Image (cartoon, helix red, strand yellow):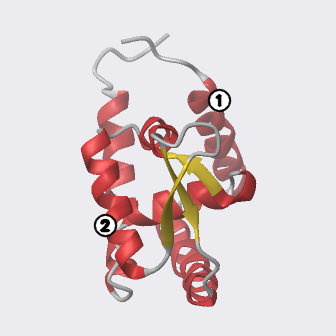
Amino acid sequence: MHDEQVKLGFLIKQAHLKFEVARNEFYKTYEMTGPQVDVIEFLATQPDQRAPLNTIVTHLQVSYATTSGLVTRLVKKGFVQKCPAPNDKRSVQVQLVPCPQLDAIFAAEHVALSQVDQQLTVNFSTTEFDTFVRLLRKLNANHVTH
């Protein structure tokens, strides 16, 4: 059923790296990085645009120290603020700060990264593209044990 020579993880990583290079190049203009934007985008989906630092760590799947550094840089830029958790003052939560500049950045990002998506899939037929998206969603729905 499977070609034993295909290294699926490697192929996925190659495609991801192409996208990340373009994404990071876009964010250089705003003196931001892709991982910083990942924090902002995650917070934007949370109730009250706020989440515990540990939840962000889990979502990003990086170390606490790395996440803490990302958040510290975002605080300095004025995009997020740290605040104590309502039920546990020892726990830190991170909250998105309303910022019209972010809205403009994300609007520009949508246009720029849509172009990258088109470049990456330029040789796909409509059917191939739809199948590719369906299979990626299916792949991402699977859980992998370590």
Residue that appears at 33% across and 64% down = 72
Position of 67 with respect to 93 (left or right) is left
Residue 76 percent across, percent down from the top left: 35, 77
Residue that appears at 25% across and 45% down = 65
Between residues 91 and 114, which one lies in front from this camera angle? 91
Q: Is residue 24 visible?
A: yes
Which type of secondary structure does the marked residue at label 1 adopt? helix
Separation (CA) of disc 2 from disc 1? 25 Å
Q: Is residue 20 visible?
A: no
Q: Which residue is mark 1?
A: 138
Looking at the image, tell me whether mark 2 or mark 1 is earlier in sequence order: 2
Can you say whether 37 is above or below 84 in the image? below
| Crowding at mark 2 (Cα within 10 Å: few <14, some 14-19, many 20+) | few
Residue that appears at 61% across and 43% down = 132
Residue 62 percent across, percent down from the top left: 33, 40
The quadrant holding residue 134 is top right
Report if the CB atoms under discs 2 and 1 are less than 8 Å apart. no
Residue 28 percent across, percent down from the top left: 31, 82
Callout 1 amino acid: Lys
Which residue ends up furthest to the front in the rendered image?
89
The quadrant holding residue 60 is top left
Residue 136 percent across, percent down from the top left: 59, 38
Callout 2 amino acid: Val
Q: Which residue is mark 2?
A: 21
Position of 114 with respect to 69 (left or right) is right
Between residues 85 and 140, which one lies in front from this camera angle? 85
Q: Quadrant of the C terminus?
A: top left
Position of 12 with respect to 63 (left or right) is right
| Crowding at mark 1 (Cα within 10 Å: few <14, some 14-19, many 20+) | few
Position of 127 with respect to 101 (left or right) is right
Can you say whether 71 is above or below 47 in the image? below
